[in-house]
Amino acid sequence: GGPLKYVSETTFEKCSSSLLRDFYMDNEYRKVWDKTVVEYEQLEINEDTGVEIGRMVKKFPLLSPREYVLAWRIWEGKDQEFYCITK
């Protein structure tokens, strides 16, 4: 029972973790390379917790555009590992 959850793991070679973090989390630039993103708006940043909230409209083939409001937090672990939780 409960809501659907998934975990994704990808390995990138010859790419620093900070460069990859900056690439994926630049939502304005994401509109350039991710053709599913129609619009993006940052709604809130909590400087104390590091939680960000944003609104995104995505368009997938054969479907009407879908609106998502997401909250995420990124933090750095040992050895320049980055972790991201999105809800």
Image: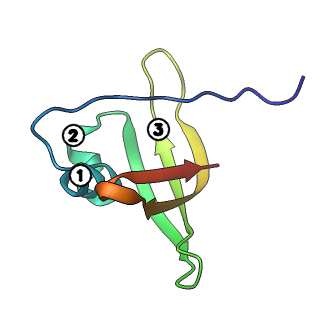
Q: Is residue 75 left or right of residue 27?
A: right
Instruction: Say which amino acid is labelled 1.
Output: Phe
Give me the C-alpha separation between circle 3 and circle 2.
13 Å
Query: Mark 2 or mark 1, which is nearer to you?
Result: 1
Q: Residue furthest bottom?
A: 48
* Disc number for residue 58: 3
Q: Residue furthest right?
A: 1
Sort mark 2 into few (<14), some (14-19) or many (20+) by Cα contacts within 10 Å. few
Quick one: label 3 or label 2, which is nearer the N terminus? Answer: 2
Sort mark 3 into few (<14), some (14-19) or many (20+) by Cα contacts within 10 Å.
Answer: some
Q: Name the residue rendered at 68%, 29% in the picture.
A: 5
Label 2 residue SS: helix
Front-most of 8 and 80? 80
The image shows residue 12, relative to residue 44, as above or below, that is above
Quarter in which the N terminus is drawn: top right
What amino acid is at disc 2? Trp
The image shows residue 4 at horizontal and vertical percentages of 73, 26
Q: Position of residue 23 (x, y in %)?
A: 23, 52
Q: In this view, does 52 lie to the left or right of 22?
A: right
Q: Do the residues labelled 3 and 1 touch (CB within 8 Å)?
A: no
Residue 46 on image: x %, y %: 57, 80
| Residue found at x 56% / y 51% | 85
For label 1, the residue is: 23
Q: Residue 11 carries which label?
A: none
Q: Which residue lies furthest to the front in this view?
A: 78
Residue denoted by label 2: 33
N-terminal of the two: label 2 or label 1? 1
Marker count (numbered) = 3
